[in-house]
Image (tube, rainbow, N blue to C red):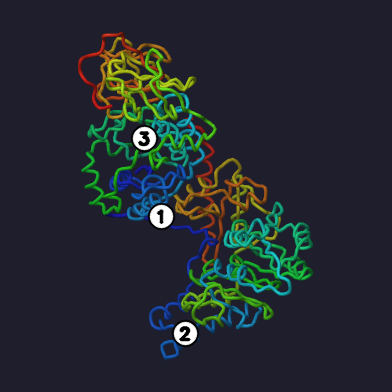
């Protein structure tokens, strides 16, 4: 049978994943089709893939301001976070782990499993430094982990202040920078840094944990001696090469202009922009239409060919209340996230705004139609 | 063509609805309603993750937009809590009726219209005429679901489509195979989707652990015949689970939640002359002189009757009918057309000696 006609897709969900950039495909495709060898092999077929992995390692190290040998490739940000949280060998007396209430579940869940502490955030989603300071003073802490740029709101953490604070208390700082990569120059104030490829034009299946030279890690999966014994498992050269390309590419210059266009248009439709005055990523716009369920706005946009997100979903695909908004003291079911990226055009933004106008008007007008 | 939202459970019926509407040229949008967190059984039925994934795979096969809608809170309030309350009140609830009346044909329909849809389509076996004014029984009498659909208000009915109303189940499966849908051979869904083990008494005990439903089994004159461990285990007309030997077949004739007594009698005590119904929804109300038919249980016989005037009218059966169970739906038909329906409040009991000689159908 014939499928329904596909409308033109306007993709404004780069914070979920982004389409691969042409340079990424150029670097990755030969590593799938022709140079498919195992980079761990000593023979000829392993040579090119191994070289590609090391080139990517250098690119990532350069972007992060680290040594190549301190870059550990993983399957993605979740694994890198686990390696940081569970694998850090604490110096001195050790201590507990602290994360922030607006962190990604890939940090919150392991921290809860480790019996760690969750530090509250302010109304912009930023770590309450006063509370964190009290927590650090209260008991020995080995590691503080925060999401550097929030995946739902795009709000940036005050990483310099966080780093100064953790240094003062002898704790390590881990930044989950999965959403930061490819959008802003990488932060420098950290002890451990999580990166991923696929939010900024890379491929799914590659991430990295970058560490400072004095950080010691214990492998969390045992087996082969890949990654200097810190992460066993065959590497994925194509995806790793894509992370190298993403790390080496300057952020697209026009993200902030697209964001401004999107936000002024959304505000004209009655949207309230989340964390509007806080420093934010230039690609992430998180809005609420007070009184309207974010899931219905997102659903409506999808019926017009516009891909957006509520930010959090359960495994069935149903939207779930956002713990990030909840932690910020905002209605947890009203969020709509629109995130642009390297291939977003002004025409995309305008098409999204036209669809948004129709959807919001329809939802507002139809309340209690059959009630 | 118009935009139509299809409620996709992940079963074969709603999958075929989506496929047929795509073929008819509509812009089809699939919606899976997440209603509860009950774990599914081995066959993976109803609202679990597997069904949402099946529905999504069918949507992908058909090339349509698909979303999962979280309606757990509304379902808990409108269906699950009412289910428990009805049993606690000594009656037998009909959760599918409240799910249709509130969840599907109010909340979901409202959202569908808000999203620009002209109609909501479901996989129910029933027919709506082209004007959207008349609800009638399905061509496949064995599959007919109008008993559960009467609470759709006339205003809502105008925006509802039941594409399977003219088809037999075999034909629906044939369409599913023809369309290459992975749900083609999926088994029928179970009766109460949020209680996968179908143990409603266990569900009520978990919901209301503080309630003690245990009490006595008595006969019509109040003589104690035995005890039971929860009056909500029983429905009027029930024979199983009584554990009594009184010289004749014993049936539940009445449940009294205040004394927690379950009253037991013989078959002759259950031939009812009529009922009083409440919460009526009328599509086309018959006048009190018109001879119409009533259905008082799913797949039950059509009983010739007359419906009084008023908000909570009595329905008088032409001949006594077996085991009117409070809490169940009563649906009134003229021929195949649904005129309206309500909830049974109480039975009108027959005078002694009225019972016909016929044995009841298995109840």
Q: Which mark is residue A40?
A: 2
Residue A327: % across, % down: 66, 51
Residue B280 visible to an observer of this rendering: no
Residue at image location 33% in from the left, 11% down from the top: B288
**Left or right: A82 as drawn, with respect to B256:** right
- Could you tell me residue B28's position as x and y percent? 36, 46
Q: Residue at x 33, y 42 (%)?
A: B189
Tell me whether the residue at label 2 lies in contact with that at label 1, contact meaning CB atoms closer than 8 angstroms: no
Residue B358 is drawn in which quadrant?
top left
- Disc 3 is attached to a residue of which chain? B
Q: Residues within 10 Å of mark 1 (few under 14, many from 20)?
A: few
| Chain under numbered label 2 | A
Q: Which residue is mark 1?
A: A7
Q: Earlier in the sequence, mark 2 or mark 1?
A: 1
Q: CA distance from mark 1 to mark 3?
A: 26 Å
User: In the image, residue B340 lies at what x, y percent?
Assistant: 35, 22
| Front label number (3 vs 2) | 2
- Residue underneath mark 3: B160
Which secondary structure, mark 3?
A: strand
Q: Nearer the viewer, residue A141 or A243?
A: A141
């Amino acid at each position: 049978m014939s499928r329904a006609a596909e409308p033109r897709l306007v993709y404004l969900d780069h914070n979920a994943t982004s389409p691969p950039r042409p340079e990424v495909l150029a670097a990755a495709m030969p590593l799938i089709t022709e140079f498919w060898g195992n980079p761990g092999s000593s023979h000829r077929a392993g040579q090119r893939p191994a070289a590609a992995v090391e080139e990517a390692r250098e690119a990532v190290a350069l972007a992060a301001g680290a040594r190549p040998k301190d870059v550990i490739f993983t399957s993605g940000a979740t694994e890198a976070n686990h390696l940081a949280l569970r694998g850090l060998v604490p110096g001195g007396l050790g201590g507990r782990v602290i994360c922030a209430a607006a962190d990604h579940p890939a940090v919150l869940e392991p921290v809860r499993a480790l019996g760690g502490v969750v530090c509250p955030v302010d109304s912009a989603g930023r770590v309450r430094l006063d509370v964190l300071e009290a927590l650090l003073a209260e008991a020995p802490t080995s590691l503080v982990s925060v999401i550097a740029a929030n995946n739902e709101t795009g709000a940036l953490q005050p990483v310099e202040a966080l780093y100064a604070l953790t240094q003062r208390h002898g704790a390590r700082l881990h930044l989950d920078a999965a959403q930061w990569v490819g959008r802003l120059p990488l932060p420098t104030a950290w002890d451990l840094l999580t990166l991923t490829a696929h939010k900024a034009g890379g491929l799914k299946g590659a991430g990295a944990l970058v560490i400072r030279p004095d950080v010691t890690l214990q492998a969390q999966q045992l087996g082969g001696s890949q990654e200097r014994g810190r992460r066993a498992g065959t590497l994925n050269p194509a995806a790793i090469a894509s992370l190298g390309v993403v790390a080496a590419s300057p952020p697209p210059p026009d993200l902030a202009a697209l964001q401004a266009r999107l936000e002024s248009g959304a505000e004209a439709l009655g949207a309230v922009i989340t964390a509007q005055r806080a420093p934010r990523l230039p690609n992430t716009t998180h809005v609420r239409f007070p009184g309207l369920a974010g899931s219905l706005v997102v659903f409506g946009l999808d019926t017009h060919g516009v891909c957006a997100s509520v930010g959090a979903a359960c495994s069935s695909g149903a939207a779930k209340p956002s713990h990030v908004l909840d932690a910020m003291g905002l209605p947890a079911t009203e969020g709509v996230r629109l995130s642009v990226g390297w291939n977003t055009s002004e025409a995309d933004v305008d098409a999204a705004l036209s669809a948004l106008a129709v959807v919001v008007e329809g939802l507002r007008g139809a309340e209690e139609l059959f009630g | 063509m118009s935009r139509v939202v299809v409620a996709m459970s992940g079963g074969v019926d709603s999958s075929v609805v989506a496929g047929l509407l795509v073929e008819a040229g509509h812009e089809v949008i699939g919606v899976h309603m997440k209603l509860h967190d009950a774990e599914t059984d081995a066959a993976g039925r109803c609202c679990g993750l597997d069904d949402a994934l099946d529905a999504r795979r069918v949507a992908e096969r058909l090339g349509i937009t698909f979303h999962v809608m979280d309606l757990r809170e509304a379902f808990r309030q409108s269906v699950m809590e009412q289910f428990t309350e009805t049993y606690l009140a000594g009656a037998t609830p009909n959760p599918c009726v409240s799910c249709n009346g509130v969840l599907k044909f109010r909340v979901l329909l409202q959202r569908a219209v808000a999203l620009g849809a002209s109609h909501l389509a479901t996989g129910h076996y029933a027919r709506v005429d082209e004007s959207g004014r008349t609800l009638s029984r399905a061509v496949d009498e064995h599959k007919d679901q109008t008993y559960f659909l009467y609470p759709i208000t006339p205003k809502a009915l105008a925006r509802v489509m039941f594409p399977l109303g003219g088809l037999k189940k075999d034909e629906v499966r044939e369409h599913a195979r023809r369309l290459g849908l992975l749900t083609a051979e999926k088994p029928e869904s179970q009766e109460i989707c949020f209680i996968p083990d179908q143990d409603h008494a266990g569900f009520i005990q978990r919901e209301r652990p503080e309630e003690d439903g245990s009490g006595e089994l008595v006969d019509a004159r109040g003589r104690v015949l035995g005890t039971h461990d929860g009056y909500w285990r029983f429905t009027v007309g029930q024979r199983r689970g009584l554990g009594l030997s009184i010289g004749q077949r014993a049936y539940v004739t009445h449940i009294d939640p205040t004394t927690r007594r379950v009253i037991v009698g013989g078959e002759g005590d259950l031939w009812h002359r009529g009922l009083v119904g409440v919460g009526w929804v009328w599509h086309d109300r018959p006048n009190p002189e018109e001879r119409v038919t009533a259905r008082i249980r799913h797949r039950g016989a059509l009983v010739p009757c007359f419906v009084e005037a008023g908000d909570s009218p009595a329905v008088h059966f032409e001949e006594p009918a077996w085991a009117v169970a409070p809490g169940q739906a009563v649906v009134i038909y003229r021929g195949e057309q649904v005129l309206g329906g309500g909830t049974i409040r109480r039975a009108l009991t027959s005078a002694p000696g009225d019972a016909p000689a016929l044995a009841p159908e298995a109840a």
